[in-house]
C-alpha cells in the first residue's frame, strides 16, 4: 500500500533576531490589558485594544512582522500587491488564572499570527478535516491520526497560519505570566489580477483608528 499525503495544512515559523521581550511586555502592560466580556469565566486571558500596529512604539516589532509577511507572500507568489496587518493586539495570561483561549477561528481575515513573547501554555491547532465525520459514519483511527497538535511557545518566534484553522490555547499554569501578540492579515492593493488583466478586488485598509486616536 502506498500513502499519498494530499492537502496538508502548512504553518510557518519565523524567529526574531532581536525580540526585546522586556520592552514588549512593558508596552503591553502600559496599555492595561483587560478580560473582554466575550471570554467565558474560566478563560481569563487579558487583551489590549487591537491598535498595536498603528502605534509608533511598536514599530520595531511591527516592521519585522511585515518583513515576515513579505517573505510569506514571495514564497507562495501570492497575486496581490502586499500583505498587511489589519488588527493587532496583546495577550496576557496572569499567574494563577488558568487563563486559556477557547477553540475559535479568525473570520474576515486571510492569515492570522501568534507571536510568543514568553514561554507558557501551548497553542493547540485542530485537524480541520475532523468535522467531516460530524454527520456521517466515522470509524476512529488507532494510528496515524492526530486531531490536535500542540505548538509550544518559543520566545521571539512568530507563527503564521490560515485564519480558518481552528485553534485555542491550553490553560496557563506556569510560574510567570504568558505574553503573546496576535494579529490578522489581509491582502492589499490589487488582488487576483486574473486572465483579463484587471484585479478581482482592490483592498485598502482603512486605518480610521489612527485618526480616531489622534483626533
Image (cartoon, helix red, strand yellow):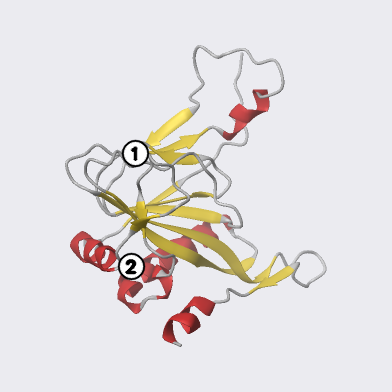
Q: Dividing the image into 4 quarters, which one contains the N terminus? A: top right
Q: Residue furthest right?
A: 196
Q: Is residue 99 left or right of residue 192?
A: left
Q: Nearer the viewer, residue 145 or 182?
A: 182
User: Residue visible at 25% across and 48% down?
Assistant: 94
Picture coordinates of residue 183 (x, y %)?
45, 59
User: Residue visible at 39% across and 34% down?
Assistant: 150
- SS for callout 2: helix
Residue highlighted by disc 2: 61
Q: Is residue 45 left or right of residue 74?
A: left
Q: CA distance from mark 2 to mark 1?
A: 22 Å
Q: Are marks 2 and 1 in contact (CB under 8 Å)?
A: no
Q: Residues within 10 Å of mark 2 (few under 14, many from 20)?
A: some
Q: Earlier in the sequence, mark 2 or mark 1?
A: 2
Q: Is 75 located above or below residue 201 in the figure?
A: above
Picture coordinates of residue 70 (x, y %)?
48, 65
User: Residue visible at 55% across and 14% down?
Assistant: 141
User: Residue visible at 35% across and 48% down?
Assistant: 45
Q: Is residue 209 left or right of residue 134?
A: left
Q: Residue furthest bottom?
A: 215
Picture coordinates of residue 134 (x, y %)?
66, 24
Residue highlighted by disc 1: 122
Amino acid at each position: 500500500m502506498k500513502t499519498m499525503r494530499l492537502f496538508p495544512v502548512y504553518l510557518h515559523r519565523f524567529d526574531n533576531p532581536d525580540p526585546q521581550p522586556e520592552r514588549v511586555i512593558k508596552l503591553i502592560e502600559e496599555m492595561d490589558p483587560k478580560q473582554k466580556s466575550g471570554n467565558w469565566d474560566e478563560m481569563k486571558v487579558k487583551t489590549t485594544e487591537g491598535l498595536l500596529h498603528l502605534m509608533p512604539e511598536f514599530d520595531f516589532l511591527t516592521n519585522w512582522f511585515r518583513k515576515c509577511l513579505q517573505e510569506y507572500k514571495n514564497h507562495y507568489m501570492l497575486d496581490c500587491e502586499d500583505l498587511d496587518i489589519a488588527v493587532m493586539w496583546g495577550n496576557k495570561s496572569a499567574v494563577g488564572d488558568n487563563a486559556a483561549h477557547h477553540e475559535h477561528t479568525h473570520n474576515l481575515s486571510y492569515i492570522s499570527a501568534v507571536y510568543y513573547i514568553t514561554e507558557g501554555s501551548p497553542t493547540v491547532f485542530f485537524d480541520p478535516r475532523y468535522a467531516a465525520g460530524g454527520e456521517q459514519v466515522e470509524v476512529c483511527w488507532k494510528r496515524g491520526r492526530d486531531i490536535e497538535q500542540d505548538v509550544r511557545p518559543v520566545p521571539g518566534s512568530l507563527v503564521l497560519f490560515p485564519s480558518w484553522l481552528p485553534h485555542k490555547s491550553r490553560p496557563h499554569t506556569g510560574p510567570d505570566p504568558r505574553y503573546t501578540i496576535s494579529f490578522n492579515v489581509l491582502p492589499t492593493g490589487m488582488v487576483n489580477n486574473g486572465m483579463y488583466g484587471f484585479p478581482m478586488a482592490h483592498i485598502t485598509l482603512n486605518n480610521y483608528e489612527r485618526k480616531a486616536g489622534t483626533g
